[in-house]
Amino acid sequence: MNERIESIVAMKLPAEESVRIFRHRLTANARKRLPRIAIVTGIHGDELEGQFVCYEVISRIKAHPECLSGTVDVYPALNPLGIDTLTRGIPGFDLDMNRTFPGDVNGAVTEQIAAKIIVDLTGSDLVVDIHASNLFLREIPQIRISESTEPALMPYAKLLNVDFVWIHAAATVLESTLAHSLNSIGTKTLVVEMGVGMRVTQEYAHQLTDGIFNAMKALGIWTGEVAPVRSPMISAAHEVEFLNAPCCGLFVPGVEHLHRMKAGEAVGSILDPLKGTEVVKILAPCDGLLFTLREYPIVDEGSLIARILRD
Amino acid sequence: MERIKIFELKSLYRESMKVYGFRFGEGEKTVCIVGAMRGNEVQQMYICSQLVKALGKAERAGKIEKGKSILVLPNINTYSMNIEKRFWPTDNTDINRMFPGYSLGETTQRVAAGVFEEIKDYRYGIQFASFYIPGMFEPHVKVMETGYEDVETAKLFGLPYVVIRHPRPYDTATLNYNWQIWDTKAFSLYANRTDRVDETNARRMVKSVFSFLGSLGIVRCAAKGVRSRVVRDDSFVAVKSACGGVLLRLAKTEETVRQDQVLARISDSFTGEILQTLTAPCDGKVFFVHNEPLVHEGTVAYRIMPGEE
Ligand SMILES: [Zn+2]
């Protein structure tokens, strides 16, 4: 096995420092072209669930280097300044990096960086872009794919050991994401979303890592043993109900995340701490699985409280 | 003049956020003008406040055409401005990426929906926009190429440039784009700056709006601007830094420059040594200048409009 850590982007900042985006490449010894998987994370600097996955993937390979039969590229921090400063976007630009793709070599700094990332990832047999939820919501491990890419991506999505695959309508706004840009040039990219912002949920990381090794085996990148994977629920067969706060206040949940809701059962309450009153109970509109649950207690009118996958 | 509450959003411990509009004249919904949508758009709000003043005066003098009304919303995001944050205070979303909005959706979708409902039926929509990169601009009007754009009418502002922009994916959730989709002729006016007040520029922008209103017979006035040059937004030539450091600017916006003329120098942050001299790649006019003291490697420090007037 060969391994090398190198920077794929280096950009000088005003005072002495340079910002670098690193890739750790682990590859089997071979003279022919090898299948390649890329694990990328940290586009959003406040989403840390993928950090532990990167660690796990590399350490499991290093424990059994003889089982590696392809190339594994790990990019733990596409937005290094964001991760180091608890910032979702690119610090100093107030810009969501996942709205800058495919980038432009002649554009602003952020667009030049995006363009270099695309070049580096192009040609991978599979790219897994790991996101966490934000500070506000807790999510089960899930893959999100747009309707148009479903035929190409679904077979891969089923390999990754997630609980849920959410097929959403194509939104024009999402065309500037990394995943869309790569998928549109034929580099298959899956977006994983799990856990909660600014935290690591080790259980989910282990689950996804098992799935990544399963996918590596299917792609001919790994010859070792892999754990059996679960088959995900798929949103096409069910409808997703959104529960938004009807008013502002303090949200306290009445059930655990992943609870099987009955129609009319309370997900939780919105309280008014000043008056000492319960303002409203949030009721499930249907039977189903509570796959998203509010983690951050303060809500504005409109804040998302839960999502339920209808039975 | 009538002060109208357009939208209200309650909060746990802050006073509710109220979006106000100021209406002049009566009858047909003719022109709607929107100022700040982000917390740092101070110049945009200031320009609207000057428009409210000037339109009040015009109304009292009987200069607004009968049967036509003008609505001005100086600021639809006071919550962010009051705490000096650019985007929405809690979830950091951008209201100008939420149009046409959704009244049952997330908070900023509700703000966008509540505002859009009140402003979507106007014949003309004017938004004072800002750019995400810090800099000084030559004032201009931007129209989005949606198939419904009206470049000829955009010239009536009398600003130096009418810039045509081919919409990028994220543009489809902006106010300008959605106005056009809902049959409002929409124009984004770019003042020279964002987070500082510039009174000279504000007077110029007020004059340009009056030139527009006058030319269309909505307000009787004699304000006239310059003849606009129509350009595409990709026809500006970018001048970029090849290193990081302190940017020492020589050329200013609206200055005519010759090819190879020195525009700026980049000085080493510690030693003061000149690391790079930025020169004009062609004859032309300075359209944009980066106005922060520091640059990264690859910062667009200048944009030049090639050619003569
Ligand atoms: Zn993310």
Image (cartoon, rainbow, N blue to C red):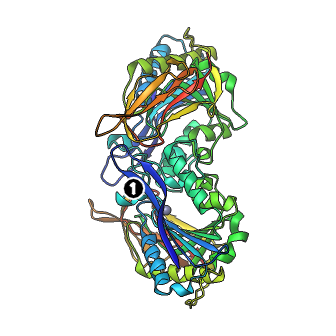
**Picture coordinates of residue B42 (x, y %)?**
39, 32
Label 1 neighbour load within 10 Å: few <14, some 14-19, many 20+: many
Q: Residue furthest front?
A: A31
Residue under label 1, please give it: A81
Above or below, comparing residue B279 to residue A129 in the picture? above
Q: Residue furthest top?
A: B222
Above or below, comparing residue B67 to residue B224 in the picture? below
Q: Residue at image x 69%, y 38%?
A: B146
Task: Indicate the quadrant where residue A82 lies.
Answer: bottom left
Q: Residue at image x 44%, y 20%?
A: B201
**Picture coordinates of residue B159 (x, y %)?**
56, 19
**Picture coordinates of residue B244 (x, y %)?**
40, 41
Residue flagged by tag 1: what amino acid is it?
Leu
Say whether residue A74 is left or right of residue B86. right
Any part of residue A238 in sight: no
Q: Nearer the viewer, residue A249 or B286?
A: B286
Say whether residue A44 is left or right of residue A115. left
Any part of residue A197 in sight: yes
Label 1 CB-ligand 1 distance < 8 A: no
Q: Nearer the viewer, residue B117 or A143?
A: A143
**What chain does mark 1 sit on?**
A
Above or below, comparing residue A311 to residue B278 in the picture? below
- SS state under label 1: helix
Q: Nearer the viewer, residue B280 or B200?
A: B280
Q: Quadrant of the C terminus of chain A?
A: bottom right
How many numbered discs? 1
**Picture coordinates of residue B23 (x, y %)?**
50, 27
